[in-house]
Image (tube, coloured by chain):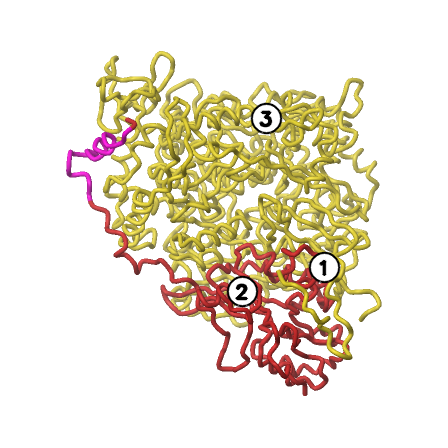
Chain colours: A yellow, B red
Amino acid sequence: MTSKPSSPGNRLGDRPIDFSPSLGDKTDYTTCYMCACRCGIKIHLKDGTIRYIEGNRNHPVNKGVLCAKGSAGIMQHNSPARLTKPLRRVGPRGSGEFREIEWGEALDIAIGWLAQVRATDPRRLAFFTGRDQSQALTSWWAQQFGTPNYAAHGGFCSVNMATAGIYTFGSAFWEFSEPDWDHAEYLLMFGVAEDHDSNPIKMGLSKLKERGAKFVSVNPIRTGYSAVADEWLGITPGTDGLFVLSLIHELLRAGRVDAGYLVRYTNAPYLVIDNPGAADDGLFARDENDQPLIWDHNKDAPAAAHQADEAPALRGAYTLADGRRAKPVFQLLAERYLHKDYSPTVVAFQTGIPATTIRRIAAEIAETAFEREVVIDQPWTDWLGRRQEKMVGRPVSMHAMRGISAHSNGFQTCRAIHLLQVLLGSIDAPGGLRYKPPYPKGFDSLPRPSGRPGEVKPNSPLPGPHLGFPQGPEDLLVDEEGAAQRIDKAFSWEAPIASHGMMHMVITNAWKGDPYPIEVLFMYMANMAWNSAMNTSETIRMLTDTDEETGDYKIPRIIYSDAFYSETVPYADLVLPDTTYLERWDCISLLDRPICDADGAADSIRHPVVTPDRDVRPFQDVLIDLGARLGLSGFIKEGGRPRYPGGYADYIANHERQPGVGMLAGWRGENGDKTGKGEPNPAQLDRYVENQCFWREELAPGHRYFRNVNADYLAYAQSKGFVKSTDPVIVQLYSEPLQKFRLAARGHGDIQPPDRDRQRVETYFDPLPFWYEPLDNHATDGATYTLHAVTQRPMAMYHSWGTQNAWLRQIHGSNRLYVPKMAADRLGLVDDDWVWAESRSGRIKVQIRIMEALNSKTVWTWNAIGKRAGAWNLDPAAKDMTQGFLLNHLIDDLLPEQAGGYRYANSDPITGQAAWYDLKLRLEKASPEETAVSSPQFEVLGQPPTTLERPSVLRYGAVKGRR
Amino acid sequence: MTGLPATPPQRKLGLVIDLDTCVGCHACAVNCKEWNAGGYHAPLTDIDPYGVEPDGVWFNRIHSFEVGTGPDTRVVNFPKSCLHCDNAPCVTVCPTGASYKRVEDGIVLVEEDKCIGCKLCSWACPYGAREFDGDAGVMKKCTLCIDRIYNDNLEEVDRVPACVATCPASARHFGDFADPNSNVSKLAAERGGFDLMPEMDCQPVNKYLPPRPKKTGGDTDRVPELQDASPEGGFLGWVDRLLSSTEHV
């Protein structure tokens, strides 16, 4: 960019400036792990230490940029909180008293515990992983072990949004789709608490703004992305669904929907049986081939849906040949959303968004979608052979994240957002939301959960994967009484579509022994004794609680693997120290959560850039080793020898899930010339390393839009092993599986919910999106607890382990509770005051800051800044501990008692998603005598025998010999 | 005291910082820290990094604050680093000549070997852009990545300051303001680039771009209100009309 000036540029008498210092003696590439973006990074090493990490310009995710976390990776890698050796607890749980042991002893202990459980009752192992990116391995290991109790952190992250997307259009926000940043003219962003995803959103917003598109942020808090939005709608938490359905009300009122799109590619014309009280009420009318029926205008008769020459009706009521009455889905949804309950005037007060604004936003969306079509000169043909000369799109795009998912109404709210997108015809249309391969996948093509009674047997693998997508009550994991089979109660009537499990309920349920006690709790990379737990104080108590008779811990054995001395480590009986992300192999697989973008399929690896200087092992290697030692069939060869003696790298290259389909899609086949499907290639990882640790295959121009119904794309996707068949993924405005659960709740069918759950299933399993007040808000005395409380994760720390990081903790080292000006005035609070914040279940003392750009009924704070003294090798007197705080102490993991005494999880009733943001609280000024220290404070955790030096002065990068 | 260049620098290298797209993510600040930790001013010392009051040297800091009150309150994310002023008071105040402005490109630098740590420059800088390294006892500051922008070991595309290369929102641009056709001169001209605190007469080289005009509710005239469609043809009568007008049905 800038050529060197002709003169050397050194002033007379100065030490010469070195204009061209070397960046080191070695350059390497790998994949970042400082959050969930998985950007490509280029690492410069000098004398074996890391000089500099930068974004990889060739990488499809970040294209050269790198966020604050990624650049702070050096400090994560060098953190003095790193564990150094396997540990065996010697003091009481939580004391931090350990003795160091050798790996051999550690593995023997683990094998002893695990083998005994597997031989007797595999259910007594609960294996849950946190923010790890190796779920394709961990889930398969758990399946081979045979326990039904496995999941990762998705149940407390965004499972309600993931499932809402899958059940609606075979994809989901963030991981499996992205806004069409190059063509969108209007972006509605809901509740992104500075989170998923990181760099791509920033890059995308910059593009949008460059092109002059309008960006509307719907968020109670105006920071970060909302700060640069054209328009900020400071919505009241948990009411987004109401706002969206009101937009839909307006579009329907004005007749501004894409009717052609609806009849062709969605179930809008499907006939829904209207037969109150009967077992078929609310199901689709079907022909003898089980095909859903539509009403054909031309023939004035029912016909199988999706035939090229038919004219489906979207409105009316019809009588079928057998006399049953039926209405098209579209008629039903119009009847519902045109109701005055969804009119802007009615929803304005509750949402905090004026009716005039709602009407205007609806008008702007309609105008953008229908008057400003995006046309791409690219012919395509749908699966019925209907050719179109151009790809015509509706340039309204949407994105949503934490502010939707962290509410107990998040599934239905996310469905409402998708409904809005579908009515506009902006699903995988130019300018709208775009699928990322390997999605879309039809909800009915995905696995069903395994672990039902009879499927769990000693010393036997589970017959299939743990996590899946139930199609109806027959897929639940319940016994004849309807009781839960998993420790987290996922896929029970309490959370039927808990497709990511419910990690947040494991400790509570295991402590209670409900539905049964467990023997071993095995966790990886999840800070469940601190910021990843609801009701942290109680969780700590459960981890240390003992049986009165035997004196044993109620959760008898805890194995934990982490790279750092987090708050959870002291609660483990056996600690398996992990490496940092720069010291190991990993793969970001199409079988898990890939890094694809809308224009290409992609996956990537990590490889060891530096060698560990501690006695630590990559968790994935350890897991494979344990699998072989336990004799799990997938991990051994005939004769019992390990199948993957080369550890995770060996597994990545050679494991096949189905013939030809493995962890990585690139350079498959013996010669490395196949993609997607192909035999394992012994040199595959070399090819990845040569290609800067990623593989990407650009999609053909005809494969880039309308992929759920695009014949060429579907054939391509099948050929690559992305999907099983070339069947189209018809968009499900009306979700029939939900109605099946509801019919069971009404007493139909053999599989029946316990009476306790009937009304709950009846209410929430509405096949059309609706809005309800978040469950805990509803159960809380709104006159006492008047303020909503939510958290955000700072961009410099989202999804990372930031406050231990020497650089990041200088940016966010302690947190405040942000209080809206109006509420502060009412309570007589000023900046820097200390207050007691009280919810129905807890009380914390925190320091406040007053904020204007904030919904007037909402307080918030940065999440996971507060740390526990003694953890992370930080000074126990650091502000992270004394001023920082967690809101988690106020969030009950259970809802208040129902009639009958049962307490449901504080979760979405459909998917089990943790309802972090359903919190309501009240504030009271702390008395002047009270100390300026946050509350609660806990006993200082003890340190492991070997703790790395915590430098008092960090001179990273200092040149030796200079001061 | 130290003199500024007798003649204006041949080139005026500096940054354009776009307040329209800066989301306050701190990417620039941390990548700057990372690069410069091993760069011209190495190290960027962090005192008490794991302790009670961590205090490190940062050449680039992001300030986020609210402007205004009530519903029109704006939140501004404001990155701030040395602005490499043409009339740099941090240079003229320096008693030893350690602080100087390069005649070749206008970059303001500190020569550590001449710095006595008197901090006069940090008092003189109205922007608070100087960073004292209490461990080394010298003043340090943004070098505009002088060890990147001319670096033969980097590909040409990478010869930009670290903050510019890493910014995910493309909110930072680097170039020569002495050239009216440079990317930064054109951006500043097109987007109304402004000087920070012009009343101080420091004549900063770096320019800030104001937020683009917001497309908010003020332009309601652009889009007509939605009209009720249902009365004609009865409930949802418009659906049939829509369908009959779509060619493929």
Position of residue A41 measured from the top left corner of the image (x, y, whole percent): 66, 48
Q: Taking the image as drawn, is residue A934 in sight?
A: yes
Is residue A448 magenta-colored?
no
**Which residue position holds label 1?**
B152
Q: Amino acid at mark 2?
A: Ser
Instruction: State the image coordinates of residue A687 (x, y, percent, origin top left).
Output: 71, 35
Q: Which mark is residue B60?
A: none
Q: Quadrant of residue B127?
A: bottom right
Q: CA distance from mark 1 to mark 3?
A: 53 Å
Residue B118: give x, y in percent of width and height: 70, 83
- Mark 1 element type: loop
Indicate whether A613 appears above or below B138: above
User: Residue flagged by tag 3: what amino acid is it?
Assistant: Pro
Q: Residues within 10 Å of mark 3 (few under 14, many from 20)?
A: some
Q: Secondary structure at mark 2?
A: loop
Which quadrant of the figure contains the N terminus of chain A?
A: bottom right
Q: Along the horizontal axis of the image, is A225 left or right of A18?
A: left
